[in-house]
Image: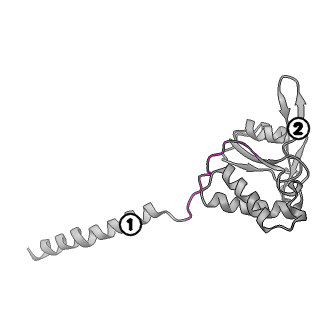
Amino acid sequence: PLYSKVVLAQTKDAEQDGFLQTYEVFDMKLNADLVVLSACNTALGKLSKGEGLIGISRAFLYAGVPGMVVSLWSVDDEATSIIMSNFYGHLKEGLCKNEALRLAKIDYLNESTSIKKDPFYWAPFILIGNWQPVPLESGFNYTLLAGIAIGILLIFVIVIPYLRKRKSG
């Protein structure tokens, strides 16, 4: 299990092999609220006496990630794409991770044909760990905008009349 790996996008960096191996994740300190491992069998690992299940999902928990979505068995690519797209959409709405995953599965069931409603297609994904919402940063800083607006208002209301009064006096 320590040599299980995630295949990453190719890079021109000669030092990188394009794989993220489980033992490498154990050495990391990650600052992420959620990791999604939507490939096949990502919740699996080796049962180690006195340690429990050791696999890539445990490595991410050890590296500091409080919540993960993983799969319990081989997944269907089309179903996974739909479920994960819906899941990310619900996270963006500010929902808790568990509720976002639940609704993503329900959305999938509502959109699917009867054959694709079999639990094999929608049920492999589970949430491990923290279920709280993922804090998403807004692309726009409203506090900064409000500060600038107040500053401009103060210039027009206080500073300009003061300077005019001083100039005329």
Q: Residue at x 62, y 46 (%)?
A: 132
User: Which is nearer the eye, 142 or 81?
Assistant: 81
Magenta region, residue range: 127-139
Q: Is residue 19 left or right of residue 29?
A: right
Q: Residue at x 83, y 26 (%)?
A: 51
Question: Which residue position is annotated with label 2?
Answer: 45
Above or below, 165 relative to 67: below
Q: Amino acid at mark 2?
A: Gly
User: Which is nearer the eye, 148 or 119?
Assistant: 119
User: Which is nearer the eye, 80 or 164?
Assistant: 80
Q: State whether the magenta stretch is mostly helix, strand or loop.
A: loop
Label of residue 148 in the image = 1
Residue closest to the far left: 169
Q: Residues within 10 Å of mark 1 (few under 14, many from 20)?
A: few
Q: Please tell me whether residue 129 belongs to the stretch shown in magenta.
A: yes
Name the spot of residue 39 as percent of width and height, x first. Answer: 86, 53
Above or below, 86 relative to 6: below
Name the spot of residue 144 as percent of width and height, x first. Answer: 43, 62
Q: Residue at x 84, y 22 (%)?
A: 50
Q: Amino acid at mark 1?
A: Ile
Q: Is residue 19 left or right of residue 144?
A: right
